[in-house]
């Protein structure tokens, strides 16, 4: 099965599939300690880590994952990422993850990108529910989720060990009727 993500246009950004040429911008994104601070793995130190991500993102045979580049609509350059994973068509739900290069934080770019993917999930994939697993200290991510209408559904204690640090999870969920477009 080809689960290549479709191109989705938004006002300032385009969500598009990854391509090999994204390698350098991808490395720059995830080697930034402020991006990795509350990510599920420490900041990248080797370009081979970008190659590994790209190999996964260019494998369009996994029906449980859809990975987009958040690209500048004019230059088509990678600014960030939006990923649906744990996608269960039978249960009509998916988890969502996202990142954005710090040069673009605080301008509503992530909100634009994530809400376009949510719209695609609800309208085109027929999903009923999205889930997000967030470090409870990640104010920017929690601000974004709350702005979009996600509800905090629970706290999972000591769920992750990242770079030797034990971290809790704040678990968020969004149903179509919660959505703020
Ligand atoms: C989370 C992230 C994508 C947000 O990107 P962003 O482009 O700055 O977010 P936006 O500008 O679209 O903000 C959306 C909403 O979030 C809120 N928000 C953003 N940054 C915030 C912050 N630092 N503190 C509190 N709320 C914040 C705002 O309320 C904003 O709503 P508004 O548009 O009504 O003002 C970005 O900070 C990032 O890449 N972080 C590192 C990776 C990461 O942690 N990903 C999430 C893992 S769960």
Image (tube, rainbow, N blue to C red):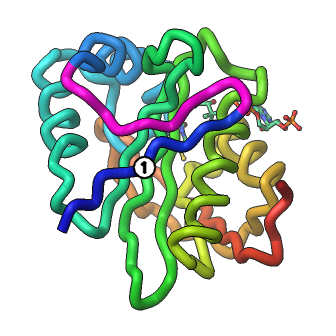
Compared with 69, 179 (above or below) is below
Residue under label 1: 6
Q: Residue at x 44, y 57 (%)?
A: 84
Q: Report crowding for label 1: few under 14, some 14 to 19, many 20 or more residues within 10 A (C-alpha).
A: few
Image quadrant in which you'd find residue 27? top left
Does the stretch in magenta take in 27? no
Q: Position of residue 83 (x, y in %)?
A: 43, 49
Position of 143 relative to 33 (above/below): below
Which residue is at 77% across, 21% downward? 107
Seen from the viewer's position, the closer of residues 152 and 27 is 27
Give the x, y percent position of residue 67.
37, 47
Name the residue rendered at 51%, 72% in the picture.
125
Q: x, y (%) of residue 51?
A: 14, 27
Residue 78 visible in image: yes
Span colored in magenta: 11-20
Determine whether 129 is above or below 20 in the image: below
Q: Can you say which quadrant of the picture contains the N terminus? A: bottom left
Tell me: is circle 1 under 8 Å from ligand 1.
no
Residue drawn at the location 39% of the way across and 71% of the way down = 87
In the drawing, does residue 64 fall left or right of residue 105? left
């Amino acid at each position: 099965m080809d689960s290549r993500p479709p191109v989705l246009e938004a006002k300032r950004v385009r969500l598009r599939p990854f391509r090999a040429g994204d390698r350098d911008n991808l490395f720059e994104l995830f080697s930034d300690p402020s991006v990795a601070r509350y990510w599920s793995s420490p900041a990248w130190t080797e370009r081979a880590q970008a190659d590994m991500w790209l190999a996964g993102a260019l494998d369009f045979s996994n029906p449980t994952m859809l990975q987009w580049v958040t690209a500048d609509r004019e230059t088509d350059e990678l600014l960030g990422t939006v990923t649906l994973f744990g996608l269960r068509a039978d249960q009509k739900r998916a988890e969502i993850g996202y990142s954005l290069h710090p040069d673009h934080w605080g301008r509503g770019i992530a909100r634009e990108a994530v809400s376009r993917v949510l719209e695609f999930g609800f309208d085109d994939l027929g999903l009923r529910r999205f889930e997000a697993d967030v470090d409870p200290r990640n104010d920017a991510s929690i601000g974004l989720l709350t702005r979009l209408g996600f509800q905090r559904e629970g706290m999972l204690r000591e769920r992750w060990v990242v770079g030797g640090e034990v971290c809790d999870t704040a678990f968020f969920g969004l149903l179509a009727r919660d959505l703020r477009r």
